[in-house]
Image (tube, rainbow, N blue to C red):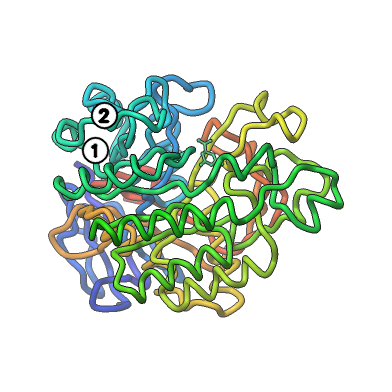
């Protein structure tokens, strides 16, 4: 195996930031110290860059099996690597749905063939995502599922959700709630408010999200079990989670990069790449989410990478598939919207994308330490670049950030000691 030496970077370790070199051998981090000599390793000069634990994403869509025209595990993991992610958890809304051990095992096998990015399948809560029959949690756990979610839909029947929480608890599995009341969505295609009125489009009330957040937090409390709330997008949603946590609820939650940067004003122009579930919200929501990240109400950031084919976006707004191809812009969007304006310190942001999400699902990832798997991301905080979806390695080019200039860029990603992204460096 090729040996690597990453020199002169600012290295984020569990003990804090250190100016040192990182030696990678046999897939592991074997030395962390200043002034190391190559000793046969390829040397990467990371002067001026952050050297981070490989990023961890607990919410993405890889689309395989069944929707390979949007993405497959090989293209999705390549996109993850380009975004600095080395451990990713993929949602169950594939075809067939990941609601049984065969599909879970298929995903893991494909991921091993694809390369060194670790893929952790999230299996469905209900068979076929239909909200009715619960899946076999023990089988799914044995097959390698790390959590359960009907993401894309909430479990509509509250009693069924209660049973699912109580069943999952016996196996120590976390349920990830997709908070969206489809009756309240009622055909809405964007956030209900000033812009939906101005643009003449059906809006979705924020209560569609907030009512299910409240319901699922209360059900988890009732069953004394944990729950993770996906893609929180509203001020009210964050407030409800703050309340649930204060009561001692075992609640964690995430938001996604696009909710921290973009708002429903971006829908002006009717670009279907701005269509996402939950929808882009208002500037007040965006600011409230940032406050919720600062005070710890929001535990982590997840991409909700949702690639779609051009033909599924190049249609009337109401008919377009919701979702944003997010891996390749995630860290830059977060850096630009959170660190550059001074809302978060760099280390706080990195934690939200590494150790914090790993802890939520109990993954052995997100920490750059001696002896650990060499999952390492090199990030240049000064680089300024313009998003060109034509350069995405994801099959999904669907991003509302096309043409935006962002600050900070991943230059290299090592996964299990292998260079998974970045120009190969000197011997
Ligand atoms: O925008 C979204 N797209 N939100 C989801 O919850 C599902 C996802 C998808 O699968 O495309």
Which of 249 and 219 lies nearest the eye of the viewer?
219
Left or right of 108, for residue 349: right
Q: Which one is earlier in the sequence, the residue at label 2 or at label 1?
A: 2
Up/down of 300 relative to 78, above or below: below
Residue depicted at 46% across the width and 71% down the height: 48
Q: Give residue 309's position: percent from left, percent from top.
A: 60, 27
Residue depicted at 47% across the width and 67% down the height: 240
Q: Residues within 10 Å of mark 1 (few under 14, many from 20)?
A: many
Residue matched to label 2 = 104
Which of 403 and 307 lies nearest the eye of the viewer?
307
Residue matched to label 1 = 145
| CB contact under 8 Å: marks 2 and 1 | yes
Disc number placed over residue 30 in the picture, else none:
none
Up/down of 131 relative to 355, above or below: above
- Does the rendering let one see residue 371? yes
**Which quarter of the picture shows residue 418?**
top left
Left or right of 324, for residue 110: left
Q: Give residue 191's position: percent from left, percent from top.
A: 69, 52
Residue sitting farthest toward the front: 159
Residue depicted at 29% across the width and 72% down the height: 248
Left or right of 264, for residue 105: left
């Amino acid at each position: 195996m090729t040996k690597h030496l990453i020199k002169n970077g600012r290295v984020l370790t569990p003990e804090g930031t250190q100016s040192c070199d990182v030696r990678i051998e046999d897939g592991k981090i074997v030395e962390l110290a200043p002034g190391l000599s190559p000793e046969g390793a390829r040397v990467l000069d990371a002067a001026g860059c952050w050297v981070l634990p490989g990023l961890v994403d607990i919410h993405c869509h890889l689309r395989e099996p069944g929707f390979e025209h949007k993405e497959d595990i090989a293209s999705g993991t390549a996109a993850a690597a380009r975004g600095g992610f080395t451990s990713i958890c993929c949602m169950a809304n594939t075809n067939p749905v990941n609601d049984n051990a065969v599909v879970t095992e298929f995903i893991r096998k494909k991921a091993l063939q694809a390369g060194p990015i670790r893929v952790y399948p999230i299996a469905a809560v209900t068979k076929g995502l239909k909200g009715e029959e619960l899946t076999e949690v023990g089988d799914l756990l044995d097959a390698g599922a790390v959590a359960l979610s009907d993401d894309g839909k909430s479990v509509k029947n509250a009693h069924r959700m209660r049973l699912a929480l109580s069943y999952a608890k016996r196996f120590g599995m976390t349920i990830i709630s997709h908070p969206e009341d489809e009756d309240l969505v009622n055909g809405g295609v964007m956030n209900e408010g000033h812009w939906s009125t101005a643009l003449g489009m059906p809006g979705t009330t924020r209560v569609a999200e907030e009512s299910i957040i409240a319901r699922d937090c209360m059900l988890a409390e009732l069953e004394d079990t944990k729950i993770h709330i996906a893609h929180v997008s509203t001020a009210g949603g964050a407030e409800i989670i703050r309340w649930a946590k204060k009561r001692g609820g075992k609640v964690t939650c995430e938001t996604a990069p696009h909710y921290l940067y973009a708002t429903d004003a971006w829908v002006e122009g009717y670009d279907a790449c701005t269509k996402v579930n939950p929808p882009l919200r208002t500037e007040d929501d965006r600011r409230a989410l940032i406050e919720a990240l600062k005070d710890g109400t929001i535990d982590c950031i997840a991409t909700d990478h949702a690639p779609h084919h051009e033909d599924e976006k190049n249609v009337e707004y109401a008919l377009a598939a919701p979702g944003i191809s997010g891996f390749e812009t995630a860290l830059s969007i977060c850096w630009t919207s959170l660190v550059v304006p001074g809302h978060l310190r760099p280390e706080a942001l990195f934690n939200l994308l590494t150790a914090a999400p790993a802890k939520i699902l109990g993954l052995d990832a997100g920490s750059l330490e001696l002896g650990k798997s060499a999952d390492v991301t090199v990030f240049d905080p000064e680089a300024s670049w313009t998003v060109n979806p034509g350069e995405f390695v994801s099959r999904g080019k669907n991003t509302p950030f096309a043409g935006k200039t962002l600050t900070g860029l991943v230059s290299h990603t090592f996964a299990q000691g292998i260079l998974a992204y970045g120009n190969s460096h000197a011997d």
